[in-house]
Amino acid sequence: MAVLSFTLMPEAAAKVHDLLVCLGKFSDTVAIEARRERFTFTALNSSKSAYAALSLDAKQFFTSYECIPSQGSPDGRFTCSMYTKALLSVFKGRLYDPLGRDGAIDHCEVSVQDRPDQTECRFIIKMICNQGVIKTYKLTYEATEVMHALFDRNVAKNRWSMHAAAMKEYIEYFGTKTEMLDIFAGEDGRAVFKSYTEKITNGKEILKHPLVTAVAVNTSDFEEFNVQMGLHIIISVKDFKAIVVHADTLKTSLKAFYSQPTRPLQFSYGCDGLLCEFTLMTSGDYNAAPTPTPAPQMPSRANSRAQSTANERPDMRGGRLEMPPPVEPASRRSTRRRNPGSRKARSPRSAEPDPDSLFIQPDEDDARWEPVDYNNEEETLGWDASAEHGSVAFPTFRDSGTLSRTETEDNNEAIAPTQRVSQVKGLW
């Protein structure tokens, strides 16, 4: 047999009414857990995504309090569950009236009828009014096992705190049809509370139109604000409104604790022996920018030759570092081996070419179609199809074929990337 009885003053009874209104927005039933040192109301919504626990301190909140669980152990407890509307029908709105007008109560007495000699178990509430009228309510309860949601605040590094009255002004801007709330910290020193609803379509019909309302608050307006930049945490707008409205009735500050999206978020507040904790599941996007790292830079054409030759062993001659000559492409070497007579030593050009000649001198022709200043140190941009330069320090395009040169289908004659006009036949 469990023994549970306590007495509430009108102001405390009015707070019980307010917390029951808040819990009614989460679940149709409320669970009660009574221990020797505290009395707790808990609620869990149908989707199991929101859990609420409102604890009443036995010494501060109640005028008198006695709880002896049936087990008789110091850590024992008495648990039951009832419909929220049934309790709200007893703890009505105007229980506390400072002026002492009609309808106000003097105090409230609550006891549990849990004895073997009784046919039914009842949760008995007596309202003693100022005019000597006593209203007695006997509510049926159901024995249940109460579980609590665990939340580790040591892991929750993101925290902020604001007075509930200021937060209540901000939630009035949220649309009545919005469903989700995105909370994140911007780079401009503001915290953004963005309520929205997603667009839902069924074929060509639009069932819901998207609606977005964003409220930006300066971080200096918070009592405490320590949130990672770019971290989006998404919760239910309905749950957030219910929490803020109830926190405003206590005239206290609302505190938030969370770590990252998809991990639980907890709101906490309380005063005068009443502690409220709401644990909500979250979603969101982790867009917090990591530490910026410098992007790798591709070497320019001007210093690519210096980078390619830096991997080679330097040659010190006479105390001076000499750079090796540029490597000749394999395609030009193969052409020189196959056509030894095509690149013979040039004779000095004549100062005045024959004006009556109808043809361009061979030396001038060769000079026109050769790469300009090929032997100079300036780097030229091209496509490395030879795939033979293993010492190149930057990525290059490579030919997917197995041949390192271009071959014709008729005579398999190798043609260099840059060739003389005299080697091209059949074009004119």
Image (tube, rainbow, N blue to C red):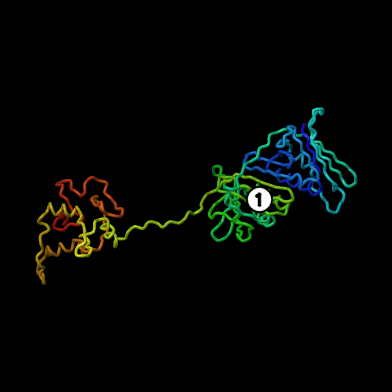
Q: Position of residue 274 (x, y in %)?
A: 72, 48
Q: Residue furthest front?
A: 74
Q: Position of residue 195 (x, y in %)?
A: 61, 52
> Which image quarter: residue 314?
bottom left
Q: Can you say which quadrant of the picture contains the N terminus? A: top right
Q: Can residue 411 be seen in this view?
A: yes
Q: Position of residue 172 (x, y in %)?
A: 67, 55
Closer to the camera, 234 or 148?
A: 148
- Residue visible at 68% across and 41% down in the picture: 43
Q: Where is residue 161 in the image (x, y as percent from the top left)?
A: 64, 55
Q: Can you say which quadrant of the picture contains the C terminus? A: bottom left
- Residue visible at 66% across and 55% down in the picture: 167
Closer to the camera, 317 or 92?
A: 317
Left or right: 60 in relation to 277: right
Judging by the rendered image, the residue that carries numbered circle 1 is 176
Q: Residue furthest right?
A: 131
Secondary structure of the residue carrying tag 1 is loop
Q: How crowded is mark 1: few (under 14 residues within 10 Å), some or many (20 or more)?
A: few
Amino acid type at circle 1 is: Thr
